[in-house]
Amino acid sequence: MRVLARVMCVLSLIVCAGVGLASLVAPANTAGSIGLIFDGAAGRAEFMTVYGGFYLGISAYLVLALVNRRFLESALAFLALAASGAMLARLGAWYWLTPEGAMTQRLLISEVAWAASGWIGWGAAWFSRISRPDAAATR
């Protein structure tokens, strides 16, 4: 189970690092791919902060979780809850604001997959911990 948890962590690390780097290197192109247009520097700075800096911060935490096993379960718990929150917010926005359907649907599918990887990884890490309580004491 620990291997499954680590695989889910690596997959989320790749996604977060990719989104973060793309958002910092080419914010206008990255934003344009999801239908956003910047009116000025403030919007670009906000996008770079949230999608660039925050996602790279998540990536750093996931690297820490891969290097130091005691952070793995909490990192995957964070991913599961954060991605689920984003997914629920997207569903609410889609229902109440009725944005363009095809783009919203693609983003929702990606958030469902991200949340699922977090939940699966968190469950695997949790199960690994409770199934070997003696191993947790020796870490």
Image: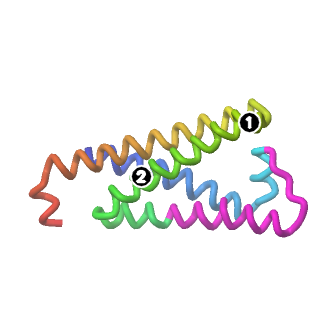
Which element type, helix, strand or loop, lies under badge 2? helix
Depth check, front residue: 5 or 101: 101
Q: Residue at x 58, y 47 (%)?
A: 86
Residue 71: which quarter of the image? bottom left
- Which three-letter amino acid code belongs to the residue tagged 1? Met
Which range of residues does the magenta coloring cover? 35-59
- Mark 2 to mark 1 CA distance (whole Å): 26 Å
Q: How many marks?
A: 2
Q: Which residue is mark 2?
A: 9
Q: Look at the picture and state if 4 lies above or below 53.
A: above
Drawn side of residue 139 relative to residue 82, left or right: left
Q: Earlier in the sequence, mark 2 or mark 1?
A: 2
- In the rendered structure, does residue 34 fall within the stretch colored magenta? no
Q: Residue at x 60, y 34 (%)?
A: 109
Residue 35 place in picture, x, y as percent: 80, 45
Q: Which residue is mark 1?
A: 103
Q: Quadrant of the C terminus?
A: bottom left
- In the rendered structure, does residue 38 fall within the stretch colored magenta? yes
Residue 61 place in picture, x, y as percent: 45, 65
Drawn side of residue 31 relative to residue 9, left or right: right
Depth check, front residue: 30 or 134: 134
- Which three-letter amino acid code belongs to the residue tagged 2? Cys
Q: Look at the picture and state if 64 lies above or below 131.
A: below
Front position among marks 2 and 1: 1
Residue 49: which quarter of the image? bottom right
Drawn side of residue 60 relative to residue 18, left or right: left
